C-alpha cells in the first residue's frame, strides 16, 4: 500500500453565473498545472470527475479539453459526498500501484439534480433537505436542549470565516442578529441556517510517494480514510440527534492514521445546515455528545476559526460534487501554511468530513504534512 | 498490491420489460449471495454501481435494498465503458488494502440517456452512434477491402452464439441472409449490424486473495488491466480504420499479466456494431491488421464460438452500464468451466474488451483461473 499525497489544487469562485459544467471543470484544472512544478499532461494516469450533473462522459471531456489522455477516466456520484468518494477512489488507484498520478475534478451547477433525492419516498411530500435538517434540529433540541441561538452562532461564525475566503459565494457576511431574524422555513430552520447550492469547481492532484517530489516540495499526505453508508432512505436513521455514518467513518479514519481527535488542528466539516456542524463536532469526537453547541459558542466568542476556516458550506456555498474537494483543498492549504488571512498557526493535522442525504453516508479523511 | 479475484456473479435476462433501475439492480445482486458460500451482507466493504442513468445515489439505494451497509458506495459513469471502469475501480480498492470484498452492480434501462453523447458537436447532426460506425466501416472497406458479407458474418456468428445464452435479449437468431437483407440505416450499416440497447443488470463480487477462499473454491483472478482514454470527441480519432485506445489498453493489459495474444482462449469484445468486432480483433492483436474479416470468416464457417461466446453485444443486447460486467461474467464462467452449452474447452485465459463513444476510450481485462 503506497503512501498517497496531494501535490496541487485548483478552484473557481463559487457563483450563480451562467457557465457550463465543462467550462467550470476546465477552469479549476488550469491552476493545477500552475501550482505543480514540472507537471505535464502526460504525467496524469487517472482523471476522475465528481458531480451530480446528468451530463455523461465528463471525465473524458475534461481530459480532452485539458489536453490529457489518461489511462482511466470516469465520473463518480454519491450526492453531496461525491467529492471525497472521488478522492478516495483516486487514492485507491495510486495506493494499489495501478497509477502514479491522479487528477480529481469536482464541479456542480446551482440547479443540480442532486439537490433532492426523489427516490426517498419515506420523506413523503417533504423531500427537500430542509425537512430532514428540521427533524435533526428538533431531536437535538429535545435531547440536549440546543437553542435557536446555538444554531445562529454556527452560521454567524461560518459567514465570518468566509470573509477571508476569496472563492466564497457570498459577497458579504451575515451577523448573529441577521441570522436570528432571517426567514423561517420550518419551525426551527431559518434561511440563513442553510447552505446554498451554487456553481463551483475544485480540483486536486494526488500522487504516489514514488513520484510526488517531482511535482511539489511540500506534499500533504492522506493518512486516514473512513467511509460508511448506513442506508439511502431517511427512515433508517434510528437516532435523529446523531449521525451514525459520521461516527463510524471517523473511527475508521482515526484508527488507520493513528490520530486521535485531540491531535486535530483544523477541520472542514459538512455544515449543510447549522445543526449539522453541532452534530458533526460531537460525532467526530471533537466535542462530547450534547456539548457541540458549547464548543461552537466558544469558537464564536474567541474568534477561533479552526472549524471550517474557509466558511464551510454555509459561508462559502455548496456546489454539491465540488464540496468535498473544496474542503480537502482547504485542509491541504492549511497544512502547507498557505491559507493567508485564515491560516491556523502550526497546523499539522487536518480532518475533512463530507456527507450525503441526511447523513445516510459519510466520508472522513485525515491529512498530515 | 494484493491479488484480486472474482468470487460470484449474478445476471438478469436482457429485456425491454417495464422495470425500474433499482429493481433491475437488486435482481442481479440476489444471485451473488446464492453463488458465494458463506457470504453475508456484512462481508461487503464496497458497493459500486455502473450506469448511465440520471438517478442519483444508486449505490446507496441498492445497498439498502439488499441489506448491505458498506463502507464505500458510489456510482461510476463513463458511457458504454462504465462496467469495466467500475470493476477496475473495485479492483483498486481491494488491491490497495482499503477493502477486502467489493460488489459491482451494473444496470441500464433501454431508454438510457447514455445512448447519444450530445456534447460531441464534431458529429454535427449525426450524433447517433450509427454514424461513427458507418465512418469506421467506410474507412475499413477503403483500407482493407472489407465487404458487406464480412460484416454480416460477425452478426450472424454472434446471433448464433447467443442461442446458447439464456439471458440474451433476442428470442431467436438471425441468419446471414436475414442480416444481408436487413433494413439499411446508412450506406454500409444495416439494422442487424447494430447492437440493441435494452434493460439488463449484471453484478460481480470481487475479493482479495486474503479472503476469497471463504467465498469460493474456484476463484478467477484479474491478472491484467489496461485502460486508455484518447479523447471524448470523435474528431481526435486520426485513423478511422483502427481503435487506438483499444490497442494501447490491450498492450498494457498484456504487459501487466505477462500474457500474449496467442495465450487467449476466450474473448468478450465490444461489438457495438459489426465493424467493431473486426477492428477489435485486429487492435487487440488477435488478428493481423486488415485480417480481422478472415479471422471472423473462419470462426463462422467452423462453428467456433470462442470470440463472444454469449453472443456479444449484437447477439445478447447492450444494456450500457451492465455490458462490461456481463462480459466479465462470461469470461469468469468460461474459466470456471460453468458455461454449459457454450463452454470453450480447456479455457484458462480470457480477455474482456469494453469501450465507449467511437472507441475514444477502452478497457481491457485479462482473467485467469
Image (cartoon, coloured by chain):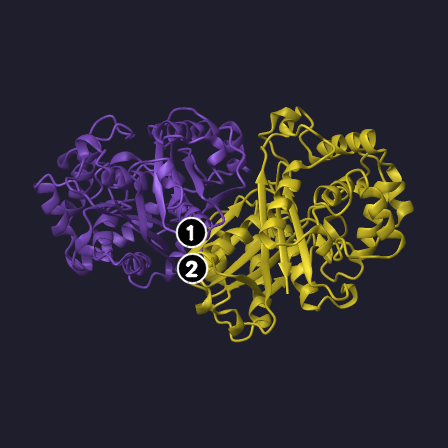
Chain colours: A yellow, B purple
Q: Which residue ends up furthest to the right in the rendered image?
A: A177
Residue at the image point whose x is 23% and y is 56% from the top: B259
Name which quarter of the figure residue B337 lies in: top left
User: Is residue A221 placed above or below A74 in the rendered structure?
Assistant: below
Q: Is residue B180 left or right of residue B244?
A: left
User: Is residue B12 placed above or below A299 in the rendered structure?
Assistant: above
Residue at the image point whose x is 48% and y is 69% from the top: A211
Name which quarter of the figure residue A30 lies in: bottom right
Q: Chain of mark 1?
A: B
Q: Secondary structure at mark 1?
A: helix
| Residue with the mark numbered 1 | B95
In whole angstroms, how far apart are the C-alphas of marks 1 and 2? 8 Å
Name which quarter of the figure residue B194 lies in: top left
| Residue with the mark numbered 2 | A97
Residue at the image point whose x is 17% and y is 36% from the top: B181
Q: Secondary structure at mark 2?
A: loop
User: Is residue B150 placed above or below B192 in the rendered structure?
Assistant: below
Q: Chain of mark 2?
A: A
Q: Position of residue B335 (x, y in %)?
A: 24, 41
Dot 1 and dot 2 within a common chain = no
* Residue B192 seen: no
Q: Position of residue B174 (x, y in %)?
A: 18, 32
User: Is residue B42 placed above or below A285 in the rendered structure?
Assistant: above
Q: Position of residue B14 (x, y in %)?
A: 33, 30
Q: Nearer the viewer, residue B298 or B166?
A: B166
Residue at the image point whose x is 35% and y is 39% from the top: B213
Q: Is residue B258 left or right of residue A209?
A: left
Amino acid at each position: 500500500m503506497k503512501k498517497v499525497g496531494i501535490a496541487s489544487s485548483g478552484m473557481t469562485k463559487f457563483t450563480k453565473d451562467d457557465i457550463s459544467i465543462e467550462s467550470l471543470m476546465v477552469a479549476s484544472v488550469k491552476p493545477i498545472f500552475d501550482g505543480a512544478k514540472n507537471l505535464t499532461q502526460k504525467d496524469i494516469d487517472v482523471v476522475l470527475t465528481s458531480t451530480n450533473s446528468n451530463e455523461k462522459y465528463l471525465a473524458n471531456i475534461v481530459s480532452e479539453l485539458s489536453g490529457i489522455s489518461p489511462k482511466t477516466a470516469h465520473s463518480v456520484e454519491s450526492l453531496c459526498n461525491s467529492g471525497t468518494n472521488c478522492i478516495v477512489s483516486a487514492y485507491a488507484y495510486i495506493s494499489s500501484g495501478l497509477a502514479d498520478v491522479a487528477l480529481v475534478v469536482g464541479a456542480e451547477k446551482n440547479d443540480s439534480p442532486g439537490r433532492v433525492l426523489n427516490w426517498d419516498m419515506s420523506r413523503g411530500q417533504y423531500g427537500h433537505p430542509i425537512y430532514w435538517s428540521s427533524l435533526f434540529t428538533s431531536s437535538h433540541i429535545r435531547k440536549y436542549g440546543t437553542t435557536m441561538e446555538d444554531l445562529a452562532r454556527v452560521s454567524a461564525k461560518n459567514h465570518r470565516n468566509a470573509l477571508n475566503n476569496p472563492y466564497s459565494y457570498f459577497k458579504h457576511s451575515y451577523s448573529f442578529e441577521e441570522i436570528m431574524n432571517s426567514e423561517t422555513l420550518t419551525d426551527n430552520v431559518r434561511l440563513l441556517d442553510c447552505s446554498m447550492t451554487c456553481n463551483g469547481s475544485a480540483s486536486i492532484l494526488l500522487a504516489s510517494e514514488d513520484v510526488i517530489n517531482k511535482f511539489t516540495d511540500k506534499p500533504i499526505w492522506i493518512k486516514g480514510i473512513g467511509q460508511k453508508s448506513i442506508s439511502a432512505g431517511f427512515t433508517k436513521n434510528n437516532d435523529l440527534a446523531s449521525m451514525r455514518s459520521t461516527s463510524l467513518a471517523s473511527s475508521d479514519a482515526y484508527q488507520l492514521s493513528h490520530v486521535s481527535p485531540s491531535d486535530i488542528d483544523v477541520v472542514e466539516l459538512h455544515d449543510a445546515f447549522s445543526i449539522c456542524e453541532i452534530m458533526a463536532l460531537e460525532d467526530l469526537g471533537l466535542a462530547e455528545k450534547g456539548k457541540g453547541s458549547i464548543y461552537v459558542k466558544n469558537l464564536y466568542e474567541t474568534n477561533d476559526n479552526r472549524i471550517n476556516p474557509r466558511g464551510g458550506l454555509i459561508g462559502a456555498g455548496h456546489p454539491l460534487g465540488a464540496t468535498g474537494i473544496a474542503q480537502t483543498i482547504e485542509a491541504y492549504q492549511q497544512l502547507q501554511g498557505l491559507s493567508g488571512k485564515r491560516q491556523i498557526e502550526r497546523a499539522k493535522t487536518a480532518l475533512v468530513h463530507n456527507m450525503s442525504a441526511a447523513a445516510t453516508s459519510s466520508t472522513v479523511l485525515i491529512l498530515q504534512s
